[in-house]
Image (spheres, rainbow, N blue to C red):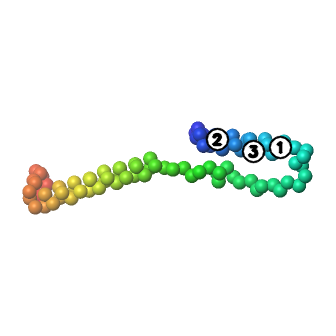
């Protein structure tokens, strides 16, 4: 599986952070409070699944249309407005 662009950017920033942390600057070696490291997943913004909501809504519309068509055909057959040979209600 290929990495997404955001994963590549996060990995690059992660590498740069550790490269900078490994370098020692003589003037800054005196008591520097370390910032707690956060995981890269917390830094990345959550993925938005807009395609998923669009697909689910399209599926709901198609399913609703099929159910309505079935109900219409049922009532037409039940009231003998439509007849299909071999099927009796």
Q: Mark 2 and mark 1 in contact (Cβ < 8 Å)?
A: no
Spatial CA span between label 1 and label 2: 20 Å
**Position above or below: 81 against 1:** below
Relative to 33, is 85 on the left or the right? left
Relative to 24, is 73 on the left or the right? left
> What numbered label is drawn on residue 9?
2
Dot 1 or dot 2, earlier in sequence: 2
Counting every numbered tag in the picture gives: 3
Q: Nearer the viewer, residue 20 or 68?
A: 20
Dot 2 or dot 3, earlier in sequence: 2
Helix, strand or loop at mark 1: helix
Residue picked out by circle 3: 17
Helix, strand or loop at mark 2: helix
Dot 1 or dot 3, earlier in sequence: 3
Question: Which residue lies at the image location 54% right of the left edge and 50% below the top edge?
Answer: 47
Spatial CA span between label 1 and label 3: 9 Å
Question: Which residue lies at the image location 79% right of the left edge and 43% below the top edge?
Answer: 20
Image position, residue 84 (x, y; %): 12, 51
Residue picked out by circle 1: 22
Q: Residues within 10 Å of mark 3 (few under 14, many from 20)?
A: few
Relative to 87, is 3 on the left or the right? right
> What numbered label is drawn on residue 76?
none
Helix, strand or loop at mark 3: helix
Question: Which residue lies at the image location 62% right of the left edge and 43% below the top edge?
Answer: 7
Spatial CA span between label 2 and label 3: 12 Å
Question: Which residue lies at the image location 10% right of the left edge and 54% below the top edge?
Answer: 82
Image position, residue 66 (x, y; %): 26, 53
């Amino acid at each position: 599986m290929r990495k997404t662009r955001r994963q590549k950017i996060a990995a690059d920033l992660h590498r740069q952070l550790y490269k900078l942390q490994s370098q020692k600057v003589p003037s800054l070696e005196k008591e520097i409070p370390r910032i707690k490291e956060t995981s890269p997943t917390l830094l990345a913004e959550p993925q938005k699944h807009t395609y998923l909501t669009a697909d689910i809504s399209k599926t709901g519309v198609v399913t609703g249309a099929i159910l309505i068509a079935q109900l219409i055909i049922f009532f037409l057959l039940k009231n003998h407005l439509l007849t299909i040979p071999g099927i009796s209600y």
